[in-house]
Image (cartoon, rainbow, N blue to C red):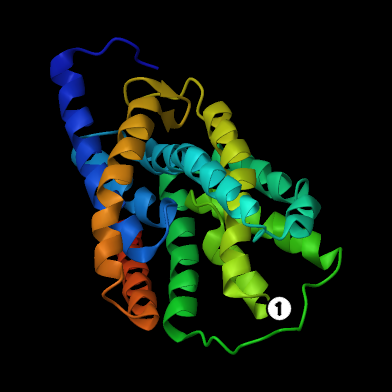
């Protein structure tokens, strides 16, 4: 971990993170999400462009993304809880399963290559994209959420796969709850709490997994880069309203198709670089 880089070395990285914040903030506001589905590919591309070690770029992108989700998910959760919109029973039942899935994914991530982590992200992103592009609102698997152990297994799986993507689990939880008849507004509100249960242990897991790794960007704690986390958090809050403004000019279906197409492009970009890059 390099603690005292020269200004000439560090300035390009800071400028790159400002750019990442602008792009990620706009896309997050446009698509109504604030997690790694946007942040990870933006971080990856910019860090590759400025010469960060390719073997750890995906690890740093995902770990930093999880750290950024912490304050936004907690703030969102508190707001939704005050409006009594959160399914607290579901969250309480996932207090153990979600972190188990998170820590399992963090442990595995510390032993796999950046290329393998990239292909896992690409596969999950493609599945989510196909759900957005071709899923129907009336699809149902049941009239209420399943009981344990099914519910616990789903929670662990959401934590596991979300941690590999650096996301707060909102897309997966929304899909799960709405497929079992829960209103989309309750699903969205509950997803804020899911984000907190994933991002806190997830960021901690990536810090531990990356501690002492070679070639980390300056001022990194394991696979979490502190300057990137702080800069992108602030910039996204400033820029996101521009994306929100555009979002309100589009229909819900247009947003779903746009976000799905974005994820397909990201997935194809990662597949290409994995097999031919």
* Residue sitting farthest toward the front: 83
Q: Left or right of 184: which side holds 45?
A: left
Percent position (x, y) of residue 177?
Answer: 66, 71
Quadrant of the rendering where the C terminus is positioned = bottom left
- Residue 127, above or below 273: below
Q: Left or right of 168: which side holds 32?
A: left
Q: Mark 1 points at which residue?
A: 180
- Residue sitting at x 35%, y 79%: 257
Q: Is residue 216 visible?
A: no
Q: How crowded is mark 1: few (under 14 residues within 10 Å), some or many (20 or more)?
A: some
- Residue sitting at x 19%, y 12%: 6
Is residue 198 or residue 215 the one in the foreground?
198
- Residue 217, above or below 258: above
Percent position (x, y) of residue 165?
Answer: 49, 53
Q: How many marks?
A: 1
In terms of image quadrants, where is residue 275?
A: bottom left
Q: Left or right of 3: which side holds 80?
A: right
Is residue 146 or residue 57 the one in the foreground?
146
In terms of image quadrants, where is residue 148?
A: bottom right
- Residue sitting at x 77%, y 61%: 153
State the SS at label 1.
loop
Is residue 24 or residue 40 the one in the foreground?
24
């Amino acid at each position: 971990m390099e603690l005292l880089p020269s200004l000439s070395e560090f300035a390009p990285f800071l400028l790159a993170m400002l750019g990442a914040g602008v792009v990620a903030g706009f896309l997050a506001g446009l698509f109504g999400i604030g997690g790694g589905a946007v942040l990870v590919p933006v971080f990856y591309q910019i860090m590759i462009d400025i010469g960060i070690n390719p073997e750890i770029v995906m690890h740093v992108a995902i770990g930093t993304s999880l750290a950024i989700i912490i304050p936004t998910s907690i703030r969102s959760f508190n707001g939704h809880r005050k409006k009594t919109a959160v399914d607290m029973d579901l969250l309480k039942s996932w207090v153990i399963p979600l972190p188990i899935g998170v820590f399992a994914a963090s442990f595995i991530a510390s032993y796999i290559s950046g290329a393998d982590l990239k292909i896992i992200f690409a596969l999950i992103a493609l599945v989510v994209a196909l759900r957005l592009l071709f899923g129907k609102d009336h699809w149902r698997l049941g009239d209420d959420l399943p009981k344990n152990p099914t519910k616990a297994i789903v929670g662990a799986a959401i934590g596991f796969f979300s941690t590999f993507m650096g996301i707060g689990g909102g897309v997966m939880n929304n899909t799960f709850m709405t497929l079992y008849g829960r209103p989309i507004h309750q699903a969205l509100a509950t997803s804020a709490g899911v984000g907190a249960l994933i991002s806190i242990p997830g960021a901690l897991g990536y810090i531990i997994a990356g501690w002492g790794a070679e070639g980390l960007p300056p001022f990194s704690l394991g696979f979490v880069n502190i300057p990137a986390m702080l800069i992108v958090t602030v910039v996204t809050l400033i820029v996101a309203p521009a994306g929100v403004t555009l979002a309100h000019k589009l229909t819900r279906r247009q947003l779903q198709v746009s976000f799905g197409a974005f994820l397909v492009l990201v997935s194809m970009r990662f597949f290409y670089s994995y097999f031919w890059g």
